[in-house]
């Protein structure tokens, strides 16, 4: 104990008893109780039919649909969406009024169209161009993974444009001035100085978009894209009349993958946070930097090493 | 005292004639005439709002001038004359003009996602397209000049304000500019860090770098400036050697300004 002794009346280390928080204990008990009840129900209720769920998850068509449909469509449409979205954001902030209006119109249009409706329209696009569109056979393309990526990517670009724009705005205008002062042109300034710093603001919501897009691939039944996991599971559910177990199978796939994607997001955030360490680490460094300054002779003349 | 003789028989490096600048209805500069000769150190003084910083930003085209002309090294800034008419310059042309002028900002504006060394190599690699090895060698050389050899791998967030500003000076010098502009380079610094930045600037002045400096550091003006230009209300009120302008001011406005800053000045 650190109570002061008679010989030393200067107070010592504080070793105090923490404040009691009984409310927390009650909350923990309640949360555990609800969780256990739910888990018990999910495991024991025959309607869930877990053996069937795992069997459905293990079907070749489902696994292939997950890899070549769900995952591939997610990655493909996000690449298209992020690339086009950043381009739209840069256009929207350009001095060129033509670019600004085009980008504004694009965002207005694709943000207003529900993805499901857009995918139905694209899936049926072959009917508008029975002879194909130039060299492209729309009819054959319309229910492929490429049309899926196009549809989801075009829609995503509208949202990414807004996210990228907020990122670009967040970069201090002194950064642009400093880059231009050393003679960088506007496009070099944007690519090398502004966008890398904007990434810090862009990455977290883009991670959310990525996970949301991963789940939105289930909308591809509107195209319809048969080589996709959700389509396959729904087909199994419809054929066997066991809809709930197949939906649980889909939910498990989405849950596990979204968890993994969440870890990836954390990694990317750290990568683009270079130079902006979390507050605590930064303060520790600051103290060190100041200490360094104090111990240092500031002036060095050219050629005089120290 | 001036550190070196300035040759005024050669054409001026910077020539500003009747420079006007308005922000909407607010006229900030009302006809500035100024010539700066190669190797000269000119300090712009004046109360805040007098237009010093705006004038500096016009030279580097951070703002567009609304009237008058500025020539740097004989070339019109921002516009060019073709067929008897003035045409605005293209982005690439403006970038080329800016690359000849180094600028140091009050808030340093180092690139936070790049290390001290990368901040200094950036312009050399991207603008003048130097080889990586040459750019790094030059950057290390400059870091040594500003006394930060041991900080090349540090990110700006890990450096003190004074260290950041010295890296910023090195970044500007890496482009081998004809002219250096300093916009209140020590105003954002803690008092104990001002000295290290001023010392670097003094060294540059003694090496014959042409400098235009906006500052409130009277000691620096007195000691380093070849010429002091006092601005107020968007016009040049008086200019001359530091001795004449600061030691024996002719105008009430300058006397009032000097007595104000003298109160703020810490004993040097």
Image (cartoon, coloured by chain):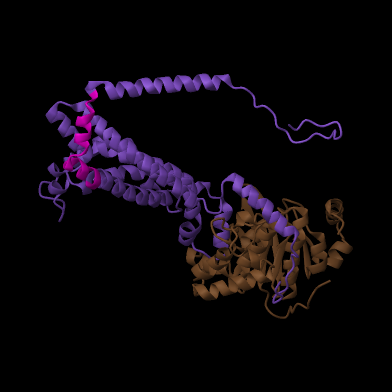
The reply, left or right, for residue B19 in relation to residue B42 is left
Is residue B56 in view? yes
x, y percent for residue B119: 57, 63
Q: Is residue B71 above or below residue A63?
A: below
User: For the stretch drawn in magenta, what is the main secondary structure?
Assistant: helix
Does the image show residue A114? no
| Rendered view: A24 above or below A213 | above
Q: What residue is shown at x 83% (from left), y 56% (from top)? A: B254
Question: Residues in magenta?
Answer: A48-68
Q: Is residue A248 left or right of residue B214?
A: left
Q: Magenta includes B157? A: no
Residue A214: percent from left, percent from top:
31, 41
What percent of the width, then of the height, locates residue B175?
58, 71
In the rendered image, residue A60 lying in the magenta stretch gets the answer yes
Q: Check the rendered structure and report the hue given to chain A.
A: purple
Q: Quadrant of residue B54?
A: bottom right
Displayed quadrant of residue B143? bottom right
Query: Chain B drawn in what color?
Result: brown
Q: In the displayed image of the protein, which residue is found farthest to the right?
A: B248
């Amino acid at each position: 104990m650190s109570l002061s002794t008679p010989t030393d009346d200067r107070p010592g280390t504080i070793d105090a008893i923490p404040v009691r928080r009984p409310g927390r204990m009650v909350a923990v008990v309640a949360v555990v109780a609800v969780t256990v009840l739910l888990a018990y129900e999910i495991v024991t209720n025959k309607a869930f039919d877990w053996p069937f769920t795992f069997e459905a998850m293990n079907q070749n068509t489902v696994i292939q649909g997950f890899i070549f449909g769900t995952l591939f469509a997610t990655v493909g449409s996000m690449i298209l969406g992020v690339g086009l979205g950043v381009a739209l954001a840069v256009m929207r902030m350009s001095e060129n009024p033509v670019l600004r209006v085009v980008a504004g119109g694009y965002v207005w249009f694709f943000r207003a169209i529900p993805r499901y409706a857009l995918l139905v329209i694209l899936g049926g696009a072959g009917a508008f161009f029975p002879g194909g569109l130039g060299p492209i056979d729309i009819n054959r393309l319309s229910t492929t993974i490429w049309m899926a990526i196009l549809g989801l990517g075009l829609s995503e670009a509208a949202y990414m444009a807004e996210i990228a724009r907020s990122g670009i705005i967040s970069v201090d205008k002194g950064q642009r001035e400093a880059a231009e002062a050393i003679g960088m042109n506007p496009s070099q300034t944007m690519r090398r100085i502004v966008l890398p710093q904007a990434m810090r603001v862009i990455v977290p919501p883009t991670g959310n978009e990525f996970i949301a897009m991963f789940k939105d691939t289930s909308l591809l039944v509107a195209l319809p894209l048969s080589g996709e996991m959700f389509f396959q599971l729904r087909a199994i559910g419809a054929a066997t009349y066991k809809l709930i177990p197949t939906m649980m199978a889909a939910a498990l796939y989405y849950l596990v993958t979204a968890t993994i994607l969440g870890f990836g997001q954390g990694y990317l955030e750290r990568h683009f946070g270079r130079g902006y360490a979390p507050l605590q680490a930064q303060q520790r460094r600051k103290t060190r930097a100041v200490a360094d300054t104090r111990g240092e002779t500031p002036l060095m003349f050219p050629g005089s090493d120290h | 005292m001036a550190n070196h003789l300035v040759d005024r028989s050669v054409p001026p490096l910077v020539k500003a004639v009747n420079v006007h600048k308005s922000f909407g209805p607010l006229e900030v500069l009302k006809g500035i005439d100024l010539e700066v000769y190669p190797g000269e150190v000119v300090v712009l003084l004046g109360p805040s709002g007098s237009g010093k910083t705006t004038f500096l930003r016009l030279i580097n085209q951070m703002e567009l001038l609304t009237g008058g002309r500025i020539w740097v090294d004989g070339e019109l800034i921002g516009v060019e004359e073709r067929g008897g008419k003035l045409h605005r310059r293209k982005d690439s042309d403006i970038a080329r003009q800016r690359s000849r002028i180094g600028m140091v900002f009050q808030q340093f504006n180092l690139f936070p996602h790049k290390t001290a060394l990368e901040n200094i190599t950036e312009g050399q690699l991207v603008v003048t397209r130097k080889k990586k090895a040459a750019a790094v060698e030059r950057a290390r050389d400059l870091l040594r000049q500003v006394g930060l050899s041991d900080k090349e791998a540090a990110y700006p967030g890990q450096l003190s304000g004074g260290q950041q500003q010295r890296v910023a000076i090195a970044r500007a010098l890496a482009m081998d500019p004809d002219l250096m502009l300093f916009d209140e380079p020590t105003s954002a610094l803690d008092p104990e860090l001002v000295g290290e930045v001023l010392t670097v600037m003094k060294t540059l002045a003694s090496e014959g770098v042409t400098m235009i400096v906006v500052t409130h550091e009277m000691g620096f003006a007195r000691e380093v400036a070849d010429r002091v230009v006092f601005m107020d209300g968007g016009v040049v009120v008086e200019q001359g050697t530091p001795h004449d302008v600061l030691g024996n001011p002719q105008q009430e406005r300058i006397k009032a300004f000097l007595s104000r800053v003298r109160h703020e000045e810490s004993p040097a």
